[in-house]
Image: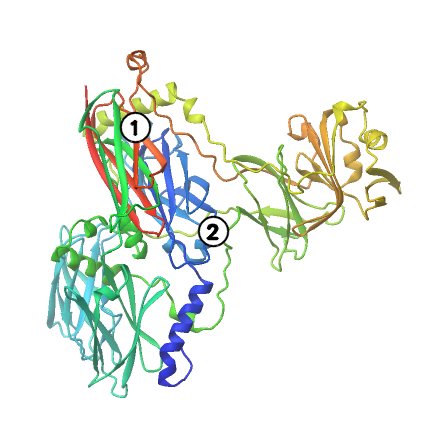
């Protein structure tokens, strides 16, 4: 709520609060293109992640890590991956485990930053997994009831003001159902009738009376008569109505508050303010007509404020996008033989026909009774679905035509499922929001907690993370007041063995606990019902055979990964000196090695304990150096002296004081074993050793070639139903591109789906089909 102020200040203060909130709470939006939506256990799920780039985001900061998981109906994670993002996109693959049960699953994608705003902002789509070993077992039926909700336009039913009320009716799986019924007051007098139009949605008008309550008596297919309460009627308040014509939208404000002389309308789309206007009330009514050309494409949020600057009503409007990414694509033929080459040409242009810099991906797979066309696409999701609360049934419907029926369905959708991404109470508080999860602009965060022997949090202590291996990956983190620690890693890819510990010489009673980076927040959106049709068993058997043949004959090709191009330079850069121990006389103790041919390090005995001092510019540094063995720190110099030098290949020395995050090292000694695996040398027993998967290594997609007669006549079976997948399509300066691949031995109808995002953030999509015959 705004503090008391003059009329001229209200709009200015609303806009200032809006701008300040967006500066401190920038939002991210993701979309995931998958190769298909139906999978057998044992198959690979290929995906491409897009982060929509907002042309108004001058900072250019995007999360460098996206988390992808697949969860079942009980919100248990079946698959998880961390995906590196570069220039707003990333890609990967997931192996569907053979232990997965039959059923529908949710595939989600989110950044660490998005976790601050709840699971409603996560990307989410439904996929199907079938286990061939249990193909005849249907997924467990989720028990539930049909839902019916009522949504007054603007937010409230207000006594004496004619109101439009939208409603939505769904089954337990979120699918719209047809209903009809009547609205009665508390005296059982009928005041309105209603019936569904599309996807279980509809609307009706009536004028509520002060002191009355209202119920809906509902007839639905296959159910007994249902009774549902309507929202309570407010004695005093505001109603905000919106009507759309060909060229404009008309907004009407009505109130029964006699002392109100003016109201304010504030319209925004994303970060951009479209209109902020003051309206004079005349007999409790005010109207405003807005030219549609002045509205931005997509969802506009319209908020009504009273004369004191308090938000009292809200309405959403969707403007069909005028800015477009037009993708055209077609195969060179409409029909092919098995093992024949397919050539596809495509281009990407904007609405003016000019070439666009685009980021594209393509999937070409078979269509049959199991694998249908995708239910979620990049255009409908980024323009509409990402701003809708809950399950969006048949999203492509709203973009396939511009008929009156479609516009009506869109209006009902926004009235029933439009949700507040912007919270005015937070904006008006004047306080900077507190965010638990930090944006990962530079690399993956490993988050943990530092505790004492009693399990309590410990503040202002340093914990250390070392990754065992040839590449030096060593990090330090200082605990905050709650004991939390953050290791900001760089290019941590693939499977790793990491060691977490504190300095056992000064903090011997502390423990480091690592926390999962994956979200533990879940949407209540229901999954659709899944049943195996007996008529599909033969088709399932064919798919299963295809999967087994691929995994048998192309297993090696499916285990090939791209080099992520990691900078292997150690965090300390070029060492001061490098010793290759095989170039010198081999000694049996580390002490002899250091004393005999490493003049930069001196060995001391103080009260029967070893100490090492690095010589820097003819003087000793103050304390023991940081000693790393294959990336793992050793703080006890007596333990260092017990290392077997015959297992050590080389030694890097840094002969000056080095600052690295919260750590200050009095020189560095980096010891490298021959296999970079610690060579069986003992780790501090209080250290925590964990197998940890970093950002996913990108798997190479394998598609066989049949260029020669011998290749075409090969007896190795090829029953691929996914012919081609590429997450990195490119176009030339004219916006043109092409791909080529070969059909398999699998006949049938195939669909190609190309999706992508232009440099200005506009999404595009193209679908083409062809047939394969013997």
Report crowding for label 2: few under 14, some 14 to 19, many 20 or more residues within 10 A (C-alpha): many
Dot 1 falls on a residue whose secondary structure is strand
Query: Image quarter for residue 577?
Result: top right
Q: Residue furthest bottom?
A: 259
Name the residue: 21% across, 65% down: 292
Q: Which residue is mark 1?
A: 740
Q: Which residue is mark 2?
A: 112
Q: Nearer the viewer, mark 2 or mark 1?
A: 1
Q: Are marks 2 and 1 in contact (CB under 8 Å)?
A: no
Q: Is tag 2's residue or tag 1's residue first in the polypeptide sequence?
A: 2
Report crowding for label 1: few under 14, some 14 to 19, many 20 or more residues within 10 A (C-alpha): few
Q: Is residue 402 above or below residue 420?
A: above
Q: CA distance from mark 2 to mark 1?
A: 37 Å
Left or right: residue 664 compared with residue 516:
right
Query: Image quarter for residue 76?
Result: top left
Dot 2 falls on a residue whose secondary structure is loop
Identify the image quadrant of the C terminus: top left
Residue 4 in sight here: yes
């Amino acid at each position: 709520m705004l503090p008391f102020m003059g009329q001229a200040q209200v709009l200015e203060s609303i806009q200032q609060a809006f701008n300040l909130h967006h500066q401190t709470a920038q939002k991210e939006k993701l979309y995931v293109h998958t190769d298909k939506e139906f999978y057998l256990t044992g198959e690979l799920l290929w995906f491409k992640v897009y982060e929509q780039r907002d042309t108004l985001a001058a900072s250019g900061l995007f999360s460098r890590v996206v988390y992808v998981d697949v969860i079942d109906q009980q919100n248990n994670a079946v698959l998880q991956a961390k995906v590196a993002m570069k220039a707003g996109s990333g890609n990967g693959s997931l192996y569907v485990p053979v232990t997965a049960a039959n059923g529908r699953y949710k595939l989600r994608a989110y950044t660490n930053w998005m976790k601050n705003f709840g699971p409603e902002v996560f990307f989410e789509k439904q996929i199907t997994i079938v286990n061939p070993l249990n193909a005849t077992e249907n997924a467990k039926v989720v028990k539930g009831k049909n839902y019916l909700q009522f949504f007054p336009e603007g937010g409230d039913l207000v006594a004496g003001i004619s109101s439009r009320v939208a409603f939505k009716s769904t089954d337990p799986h979120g699918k719209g159902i047809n209903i009809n019924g009547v609205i009665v007051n508390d005296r059982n007098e009928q005041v309105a009738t209603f019936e569904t139009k599309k996807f279980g949605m509809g609307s009706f008008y009536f004028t509520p009376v002060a002191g009355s309550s209202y119920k809906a008596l509902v007839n639905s297919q296959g159910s007994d008569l249902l009774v549902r309460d309507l929202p309570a009627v407010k004695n005093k308040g505001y109603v905000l109505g919106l009507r759309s014509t060909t060229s404009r939208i008309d907004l009407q404000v009505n109130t029964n508050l006699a002392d109100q002389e003016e109201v304010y309308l504030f319209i925004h789309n994303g970060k951009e303010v479209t209109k902020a206007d003051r309206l004079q009330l005349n007999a409790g009514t005010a109207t405003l007509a807005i030219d549609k050309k002045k509205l931005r494409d997509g969802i506009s949020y319209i908020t009504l404020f009273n004369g004191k600057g308090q938000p009292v009503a809200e309405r959403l409007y969707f403007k069909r996008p005028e800015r477009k990414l037009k993708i055209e694509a077609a195969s060179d033929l409409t029909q092919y033989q098995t093992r024949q080459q397919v050539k596809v040409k495509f281009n990407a242009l904007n609405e003016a026909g000019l070439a666009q810099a685009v980021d594209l991906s393509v999937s070409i797979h078979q269509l049959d009774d199991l694998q249908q066309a995708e239910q979620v696409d990049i255009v409908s999701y980024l323009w509409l679905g990402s701003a809708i609360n809950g399950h969006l049934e048949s999203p492509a419907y709203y973009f396939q035509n511009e008929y009156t029926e479609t516009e009506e369905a869109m209006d009902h959708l926004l009235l029933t499922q439009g949700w507040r991404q912007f919270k005015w109470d937070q904006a008006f508080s004047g306080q900077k929001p507190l965010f638990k999860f930090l944006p990962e602009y530079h690399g993956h965060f490993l988050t943990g907690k530092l505790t004492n022997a009693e399990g309590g949090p410990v503040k202002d202590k340093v914990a250390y993370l070392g990754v065992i291996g040839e590449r030096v990956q060593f990090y330090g983190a200082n605990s905050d007041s709650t004991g939390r620690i953050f290791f900001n890693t760089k290019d941590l890819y693939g499977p790793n063995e990491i060691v977490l510990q504190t300095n056992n010489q000064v903090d011997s009673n502390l423990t480091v606990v690592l926390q999962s980076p994956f979200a533990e927040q879940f949407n209540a959106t229901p999954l659709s019902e899944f049943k195996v049709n007996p008529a599909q068993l033969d088709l399932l058997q064919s798919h299963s055979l295809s999967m087994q043949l691929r995994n048998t004959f192309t297993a090696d090709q499916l285990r090939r990964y791209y080099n992520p191009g990691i900078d292997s330079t150690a965090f300390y850069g070029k060492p001061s000196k490098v010793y290759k121990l095989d170039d010198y006389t081999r000694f049996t103790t580390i002490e002899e090695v250091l004393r005999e041919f490493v003049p930069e390090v001196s060995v001391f005995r103080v009260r029967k304990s070893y100490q090492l001092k690095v010589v820097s510019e003819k003087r000793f540094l103050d304390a023991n150096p940081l000693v790393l063995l294959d990336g793992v720190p050793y703080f006890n110099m007596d333990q260092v002296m017990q290392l077997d030098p015959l297992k050590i290949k080389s030694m890097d020395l840094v002969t000056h004081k080095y600052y690295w995050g919260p750590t200050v090292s009095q020189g560095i000694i980096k010891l490298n074993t021959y296999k970079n695996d610690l060579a069986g040398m003992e780790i501090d027993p209080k250290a925590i050793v964990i197998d940890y998967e970093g950002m996913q290594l990108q798997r190479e997609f394998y598609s066989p070639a049949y260029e020669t007669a011998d290749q075409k006549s090969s007896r190795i079976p090829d029953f691929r139903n996914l012919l081609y997948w590429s997450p990195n399509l490119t176009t030339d300066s004219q916006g043109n591109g092409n791909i080529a691949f070969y059909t398999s031995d699998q006949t049938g109808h195939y669909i190609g789906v190309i999706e992508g995002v232009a440099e200005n953030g506009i999404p595009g999509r193209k679908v083409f089909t062809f047939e394969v015959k013997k």
